Every structure is written in C-alpha cells, then in structure tokens.
Image (cartoon, rainbow, N blue to C red):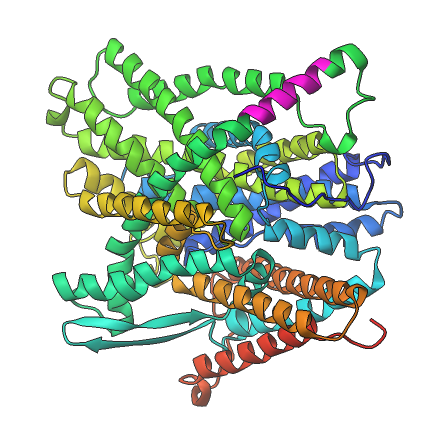
C-alpha cells in the first residue's frame, strides 16, 4: 500500500458531465434484480458452496431492460448493477453462516426479525466502513479489481461496436462452455490426478473456469503467482506432509477425496491463521492511507460548508465522512440491543449484569472484526474479484477470533459451563456474530468492486453508495423468506424439516457445515489450535520474504493475505487464476517483441482486456441463470444429457476445450493485426 505513482484514470464520462444516475426506473430495476440475484445465489451457495458475482449479469440485464425505455445512460446502468450486486453478496454471506443454526439445533427455522436485523445492520456497516477505503484501495493503490474492470468494459461496450463484438465473442464461448459444464455436464469443470504414494497422497487438480482465467489475465502474473505459492504450500506440500505424518482419513473413496478431506479439515485452517496475521498486518499498513482518506473527506466536508459543491469533482464525491461516522455510531445501540435480546433468549440462566456485559463485549469485538474483515475482503476483491474472494475464509477467521475471546470471557463467569445449554448457546451466538460480520465484510468488498467500475465509467461515488444501501435493505427484507423456502423445500445437510423428505435432495450447505463444526469444536474444547498457530508462523515468514523483495525493488511481491488465500482456496480456483496470469505474461512478452507500432500494440492490449471481460461476463451470466431452473425443478441435473460412453471422459474433453480457448485468448491478446 505504498504511495508509489499510480497511473491516472480518465473516466469514460468526464467529471464535468452530469447524467441521471439514481432514477425511478433504476431504483425499481435495481431492487428487482437484487431479489433475483439473492435467490439464485442463495441456492448456488447452499448446493455447491460457491458464489457467482452478479455485477456483470446485472449490468447486461440493466442495459437490455433500460434500452426499452428509450433514454438511458451508462451511469444509470452502473447504478442498477451496484444495487443488484448487494443481493448476490449478502445471500452468499448468509448461506455461509446461518444454515449452521439449524444444523446445530439452535433454530428450527429462520426467524424473520433476527435475520432482517442482522443483515440490514451488517450490510450498512459494510457500506459505511468501505467509504474511506475507496481512497486507500482504489485511488492510492494499484489493485486491479478485475470484476470491476470487466463490469466497466461491459458497460462501455454498449456504446462501442468494436468492444461489444470482442466481449460478445468471448462471452458466448464462455457461456456455452459453462452451460456444457454445469448444465449438459458432458464437459467437466476440473480434472483431478491424485494417487497414493506410500502412506500419503500426491497429485493435483486443475479447474477449467474461464472466468478465473480472465481474472488472472487482468490481475497479472505477480499476484496470480502469489496465490499459487499459497496453493503450493497447502496442496503440494501441506497435504502430502500431513498424510505422511498423521495418516490418511478413514473411509475415503479415493486418493483425491483423501486429499480434499485433509485440506478441508486441517490445511485450510492454516490458511485462516495466516489470514488473521495478514489481516492485522494489513490494518497496520492501511493506517496512513486511511488517515489521508479521512483527512481528505473531512476537508471535502469543510469545502461543501464554505464553498458549496462546485469545487469538488463529481467523480470524487463520497458520502461525507461525518455522515459515515454518525451512521456507524448510531448502529452501536441497535447491535447491542439485538445481541442483548439474543443472549436473553439463549436459554442461559444469567443475571442482568452478565447479560449487559456479554452484549457490550460482543458489540466491541464485532466492530473490531468488521474493520479487520472489511480491509481483508476489500483487498482480496482487488486481487480476485468478488467471486474469487474467500469470504467464507474471512467469516471463519472472524468466528475463530470471536470464539477465542468469548471462550476467555465465559471462563470468568461463575458456573457458566455447568449450564446444560452452554456449549450450544455459545456456538449459536458465535455463528450469529459471524453472519453479522460476514454481511459487513462482503458488502465492503462488493462496494469497492462497484466503486472501481464507477471510477472507470465516471459514476458519482456517493450515488453508488446510496444505491448499494438500497440493495442492502431490499436484500435484508427478502433473505429470511428465501432461506425459509429453500429449507422447507430441500432441508439443509442432515436436517430435514418434515418427515418423508428425500435426504439425497437436501442442500449440503458445505460452508455453513464447516462453520457449525468449527464453532462447536471451539466450545467443546476439541479445536486443534496448532493449525492456526502454524498459519500465523507461516504468515510471519512470508511477510519477511515480502519485505525483502520490496526492499530489493523487485516487481515480485508476496502479500500475506494473497498467499493465505491460495492456501484456503481450492485448486479449482487458484490453478485457472494462475493460468490467466501466465497467459498475460506470455501475451505481453510476445506483443513486446512484435513489429507493430505503439498504437497497434495498445489496441491489442485493449482487445485482450475485452476478451478477458467477456469470459468473466459469459460464465457469470450462465452461472446465475442456470440456478433458476435448478430451484424451480429442485434438481441440478435437469439439463444433463451426457451419454454413458462419454461419462468417463468428461474431464479430458473439458481439458481439451479449455486449452483451445486458452490458445484463442493468447492469439487475440498477442497478435497485431494489420490495420488494428
């Protein structure tokens, strides 16, 4: 986060140009899309544990719908996608946490008032805390925000026929392949090569996500390699070493499943420990940029009071920092009251002073973890985009930290652990805290992703922030009914709401199951803290290496949080991201050696960016749309047509198609055409 010279951004719409942004039709469409994205993504996360960014699908839908009304503009479309993206990201945060409440037996449904309170307050805090981060991470940083860049390119393509064609071609290819992977299912979305060697397993997995290849191309080889370094530490060193020392899990079907079990139960916890340390260090590094951001915001407030709005650039006008501080402060009391109520309803027999003390302590630690998590989430969005950011890892980090401090706090309470419901209540309170923190940190990262799009197209920041607040409130209103409906239709994990339901159709909610297991393990004293400590030690070592590289003036850097993300994320994410980074390096090297002039080379570079944006857009749109029939028909195989003869070859076919698109991408991003 140094203040090295950052390339100036010239927005698509200049600061002196004023276009309608928050309009009646934008508000209505943004709210409707937020509901649609919330429902689709909730199902997707509960089914497979992965979320899909709604920014680009919402932008495309907005451009299509608003054209029907005649007059519309790029800033209005950006406002719509900003509101809509809140539905997707908040649904993911809730799906990562609150199903755990029914899994541990704390809830038998999804209480509306508690859920709307948690999501609304968490989302608002995320918006407020991300406002000063805009200057620190977008203006004063060289973070790429790949999905923000891609969304801006998609929005701009509406007025540029050449750009639209480039995005259309790659977008259609990515959409078709995604449908063949998740719909028809005759192309696998990954290939696994794992085998037993002695008493352990070795091998690897390669994902075939074209959206992640596009994201890797945008962020470049340096950050992509930092993520892949984490994957090397976790998957290619950690998993085999752990299996060799402690043995393989019992009752696993294959070497691949054994590797996944070791990584899921042990190695990724190391990534969380590393993330805790990296996040704390990031806060230290952000202190000066945040001080500058707050100072600049206060100076803007003074200018408004003395000179009016005329001397402040429209494209640099955030919600005033005084409003942000007041809004965050006003949320302290309702958060305290909410957890005071939750503690009272927990079944614990506590005196009033202890209830007040717990609620006050929870409020303090919530604000601290939201500040820490928002910084990490925003930084990871700057590297990977919203879809690739390990929000579940950040929430798990919050649950671990909160649980650790609650464990210490409860130990001072006389006879607390003698209560029959003590462990269950402590775990439930922790998961609810995780949900509140999760909504805040996910919205913070999403807000910066949207604001990056806004910076490129020329939106007014405060208007985007207002539209995101709209999306937060709309999402908060509909999430409880959505999750109640999905629970009654499918059941979560092994918990079925009615007799006679088919357990094979239950939504596994894998991330929520992990949150439930970890929170219970901490309070029943079965948590293996050695993995967390190992992660912290690794984080310190990586920090020293990163500092040494910085002092040597190297372009290669290993940010602790990026490496931690590589340990925490599956290889299906890090490998295609790394492939995209390699592709970017190869393309730029080939382009540098080519005979074209600087103008022609710049055209090819933009063509590569547009191609990458199309890959992200095509896969994201299909990912959202395909979830709708899955919900309607309650079956993820509704489109499946793979013949028996190809059933064992889908991974090879997927690899061949992936490599073909990879080569096409390389040609597009490295070849100077005559007259380009």
The image shows residue 400, relative to residue 63, as above or below, that is above
Q: In the image, what residue occupies the spot 43% across and 87% down?
A: 644
Furthest-right residue in this view: 70
Residue 26 appears left or right of 636:
right
Residue 219 appears left or right of 359:
right
Instruction: Name the one closer to the observer, 630 or 209.
Output: 209
Q: Quadrant of residue 596?
A: bottom right
The image shows residue 130, relative to residue 299, as above or below, that is below
Residue 108 appears left or right of 148:
left
Number of dots carrying numbers: 0
Q: Quadrant of residue 515?
A: top left
Q: In the image, what residue occupies the spot 48% across and 35% down?
A: 374
Tell me, yes or no, whether the highlighted magenta stretch contains residue 434.
no
Q: In the image, what residue occupies the spot 72% across and 71% down?
A: 169
Whether residue 639 is visible, yes or no, is: no
Whether residue 251 is visible, yes or no, is: yes
Instruction: Give percent across and percent down for residue 45.
Output: 45, 53
Instruction: Give percent across and percent down for residue 535.
Output: 28, 47
**Magenta: predominant secondary structure element?**
helix
The image quadrant where one finds the C terminus is bottom right
Instruction: Name the one closer to the observer, 397 or 44.
Output: 397
The image shows residue 54, relative to residue 358, as above or below, that is below
Tell me, yes or no, whether the highlighted magenta stretch contains residue 292.
yes
Q: In the image, what residue occupies the spot 20% across and 26% down?
A: 408
What segment is highlighted magenta in the picture? 291-302
Furthest-front residue in this view: 552
Instruction: Give percent across and percent down for residue 296.
Output: 64, 23
């Amino acid at each position: 986060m140094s203040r090295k010279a950052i390339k100036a951004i010239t927005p698509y719409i200049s600061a002196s140009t004023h276009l309608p942004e928050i309009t009646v039709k934008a508000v209505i469409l943004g709210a409707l899309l937020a509901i649609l994205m919330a429902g689709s993504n909730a199902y997707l996360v509960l089914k497979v544990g992965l979320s899909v960014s709604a920014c680009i699908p919402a932008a495309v839908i907005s451009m299509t719908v608003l054209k029907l009304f005649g007059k519309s503009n790029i800033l209005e479309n950006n406002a719509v996608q900003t509101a809509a993206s809140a539905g997707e990201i908040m649904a993911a945060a809730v799906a990562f946490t609150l199903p755990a409440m029914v899994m541990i037996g704390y809830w038998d449904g999804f209480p509306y008032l508690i859920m709307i309170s948690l999501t609304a307050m968490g989302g608002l805090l995320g918006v407020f805390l991300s406002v000063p981060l805009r200057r620190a991470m977008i203006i004063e940083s060289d973070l790429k925000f790949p999905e923000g860049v891609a969304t801006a390119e998609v929005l701009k393509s509406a007025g540029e026929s050449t750009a639209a064609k480039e995005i259309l071609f790659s977008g259609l290819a990515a959409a078709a392949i995604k449908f063949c992977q998740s719909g028809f299912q005759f192309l696998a979305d990954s290939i696994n090569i794992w085998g037993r060697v002695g008493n352990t397993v070795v091998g690897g997995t390669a994902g075939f996500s074209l959206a992640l290849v596009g994201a890797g191309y945008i962020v470049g080889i340096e950050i992509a390699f930092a993520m892949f370094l984490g994957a090397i530490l976790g998957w290619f060193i950690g998993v085999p070493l752990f299996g060799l020392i402690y043995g393989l899990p019992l009752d696993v079907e294959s070497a691949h499943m054994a590797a996944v079990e070791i990584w899921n139960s042990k190695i990724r916890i190391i990534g969380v420990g590393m993330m805790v340390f990296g996040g704390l260090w990031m806060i230290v590094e952000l202190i000066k940029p945040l001080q500058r951001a707050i100072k600049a915001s206060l100076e803007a407030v003074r200018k408004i009071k003395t000179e009016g709005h005329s001397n402040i650039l429209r494209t640099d006008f955030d919600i005033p920092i005084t409003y942000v501080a007041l809004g965050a402060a006003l949320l302290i009391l309702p958060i305290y009251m909410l957890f005071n109520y939750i503690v009272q309803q927990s079944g614990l027999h506590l005196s009033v002073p202890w209830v007040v003390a717990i609620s006050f302590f929870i409020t303090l630690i919530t604000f601290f973890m939201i500040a820490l998590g928002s910084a990490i989430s925003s930084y990871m969005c700057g590297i990977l985009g919203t879809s690739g950011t390990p929000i579940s890892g950040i929430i798990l980090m919050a649950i671990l930290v909160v649980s650790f401090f609650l464990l210490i706090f409860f130990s001072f309470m006389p006879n607390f652990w003698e209560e029959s419901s003590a462990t269950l209540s402590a775990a439930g309170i922790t998961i609810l805290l995780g949900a509140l923190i999760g909504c805040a940190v996910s919205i913070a990262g999403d807000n910066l992703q949207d604001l990056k799009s806004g910076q490129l197209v020329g939106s007014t920041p405060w208007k985007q922030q207002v539209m995101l607040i709209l999306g937060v409130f709309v999402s908060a209103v509909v999430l409880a009914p959505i999750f109640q409906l999905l629970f009654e239709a499918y059941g979560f994990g092994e918990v079925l709401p009615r007799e006679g339901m088919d357990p094979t159709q239950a939504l596994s909610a894998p991330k929520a199951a992990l949150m439930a297991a970890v929170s219970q393990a901490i309070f029943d004293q079965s948590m293996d803290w050695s993995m967390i400590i190992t992660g912290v030690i690794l984080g310190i070592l990586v920090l020293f290496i990163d500092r040494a590289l910085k002092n040597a003036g190297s372009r290669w850097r290993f940010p602790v949080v990026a490496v931690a993300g590589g340990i925490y994320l599956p290889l299906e994410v890090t490998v295609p991201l790394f492939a995209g980074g390699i592709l970017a390096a190869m393309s730029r090297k080939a382009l540098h050696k080519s005979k074209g002039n600087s103008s022609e080379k710049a055209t090819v570079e933009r063509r590569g960016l547009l191609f990458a944006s199309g890959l992200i857009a095509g896969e994201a749109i299909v990912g959202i749309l395909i979830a709708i029939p899955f919900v309607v028909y309650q079956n993820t195989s509704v489109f499946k047509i793979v013949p028996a003869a190809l059933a064992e070859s889908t991974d090879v076919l997927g690899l061949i198609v992936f490599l073909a698109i990879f080569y096409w991408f390389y040609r597009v991003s490295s070849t100077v055409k005559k007259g380009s």
